[in-house]
Amino acid sequence: MIQALIVDDEPTHIAGLVRHVDWEGLGYAPPLTAQSGEAALEALRGHRVDVLISDVSMPIMTGIELVSRCKELGYRLQVLIISGYNEFEFVQEAIHVGAQAYVLKPIKIEEVEAKLAAFRAAIEKQRDIEAETNELQEKVSGSLDVVKERFVHDLVLEGLADEDTKESWVKLLELPDLKRGVSVISFGYDRFMDGGRDARSRIVRGGGFLKAVKVSLADFPGVIAASMGTEEVAAVHLNPAPDEQARLEKGIAFVQQWIREQYGSSVTVGMSRICKDWSEVPLSYKRVKFMMAKARLIEGGQVLYEERLDETEFLEYRVREEYIPEIVRMLDKPDETAKAVEYASSVLDMLIALHPFAYIQAFGFGLLSELARKRKLQEDTSADLAIPVWQRLIDCTTVSQVKEAVMEYLTRYAETEHAKHNSQQHNLIQRIADYIESHIHENVTVKQLAELHHLNASYLSVLFKKSTGKTVSEFVQETRMNKAMELLRDPHVRIYEVAEQVGFQTAAYFTYLFKKTTGRTPQEYRDYH
């Protein structure tokens, strides 16, 4: 049963709700009652309450303050606020602090019952979600398969480079110290061999593929296997012993044979070197995947070893598919421009250590060309600024000169992008602030501001807070109060007129909010000044 708590300083109002609402028919237990905010908080401490029904206007602690206090204390409640027509702006404040619904006086029982029925549906859904979450947690706790799969994903893609992440995985899975290191085996289903299948068949086949890998490697206590999709299984081998290699190759052959017999297709396998640290695994995994992709162009079903990788080909692939795109991507993010310059410098240092002058010069041309192309697509006239740098690169005779020319250009590029972005943001936020100030007598919402300036409402909220240090609603309220204080200094403007000119429909709500903000009522403020 769902438990409700009715809070009102008028006993007759409470009695009416208790008597006339069909609590049992709505799936509720007999409601608890309280005649003040303090008594309501005491009831909440002693009982589990799902729904709070509160009058908005009560002495000492208003319904708004009660809802706000409940939110601070962490109570998860569905809140129904009861308000008079002349108190409607109080309802808006109550919704702002956490109320879900309201009804206006005189109360219609059928309207209250409709709100309670909606609350019951929301509470039941929430309970179902909590039950399913608890069930999932129990399943995860009872079986480590899901946890182990997540571990393999994190390891091969990110490398557990963060010390806290590594320690949490070591503790959770009781992982051994890497005395002999860790290697990765990637099993790739050569789908092109079977002509493709429908989605359901691929999912079923993926499950069988994973099972085959796990069975074939079951005798190796240091192996953890996980599905990386329907067409790949990755196995992490912790502390591989030298005498295990022959048995491991037999296990790999078993998987290839099983797939061939079951699906008439082949499996390409890539085996990494032994990494001495967790952080080395992602690069080793990338290298293996590169070898597999290249080998499949010729023939599927091969077993490949990272030690035999053509380093020159792999490095050229990374420059083309990873390094240059990553530098360009980072320079496109205002918060990452400094990081992009640092990353580019480290990439150049690595390339300089491995390649001759001509290669480094070609890398510089390639990077600058990509940045210039990007600016051309954006119709940015500064794209022509790359021309002098190209000429400078042509005139370079040493790798250090190439690096210096490239880094100077990237630094200027990053500074320009950062300044341009800041200027655009500043101008945008200033336009929005000016609009709010000129329309302060209206109830302007974030959604309306976003539509006027062709933005997503959530993005506008984040951007405004980042630029001004205030939310839009905080800025609106502050602007209203500042304008009100200015108007109150003129004794010829009545207080209700001040309220209207700063966007409040009732003087009562304006008085409440003004005192909450300044510590004085409007009349006290006027008298003081």
Image (tube, rainbow, N blue to C red):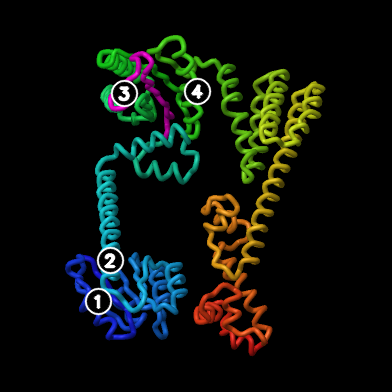
- Quote the CA–CA distance across marks 3 and 1: 58 Å
Q: CA distance from mark 2 to mark 3?
A: 47 Å
Q: CA distance from mark 2 to mark 4?
A: 62 Å
The reply to whether the C-beta atoms of the residues labelled 2 and 3 are less than 8 Å apart is no
Q: Which residue is mark 2?
A: 114
Instruction: From the top left corner, tell me how far across and down residue 471 is, in percent.
Output: 56, 62
Among numbered discs 2 and 3, the one appearing first in the sequence: 2
Which class describes the residues within 10 Å of circle 1: few (<14), some (14-19), or many (20+)? Answer: some
Q: Amino acid at mark 1?
A: Leu
Q: Pointer 1: what residue?
A: 32
Q: Are the residues at dot 2 and dot 4 in contact (C-beta closer than 8 Å)?
A: no
Q: Nearer the viewer, mark 2 or mark 4?
A: 2
Three-letter amino acid code at disc 4? Answer: Arg
Task: Tell me which label, 2 or 1, sits earlier in the chain.
Answer: 1
Whole-percent x, y for residue 438 in the image = 65, 66
Q: Which residues are magenta?
A: 178-201
Q: Secondary structure at mark 2?
A: helix
Which comes sooner in the sequence, label 3 or label 1? 1
**Disc 4 or disc 3, which is closer to the eye?**
3
Query: How dense is the environment of label 3, judged by Cα within 10 Å: few (below 14), some, or many (20 and up)?
Result: few
Q: Nearer the viewer, residue 201 or 339?
A: 201
Q: Which residue is mark 3?
A: 198
Residue identifier under label 4: 287
Is 262 rendered above or below residue 103? above
Name the residue rendered at 28%, 27% in the picture. 200
- Looking at marks 1 and 4 on the same chain, the residue that comes earlier in the sequence is marked by 1
- Asked whether the residues under the numbered discs 3 and 1 touch, taking CB atoms below 8 Å apart as contact, a structural biologist would say no
Left or right: 435 in relation to 25: right
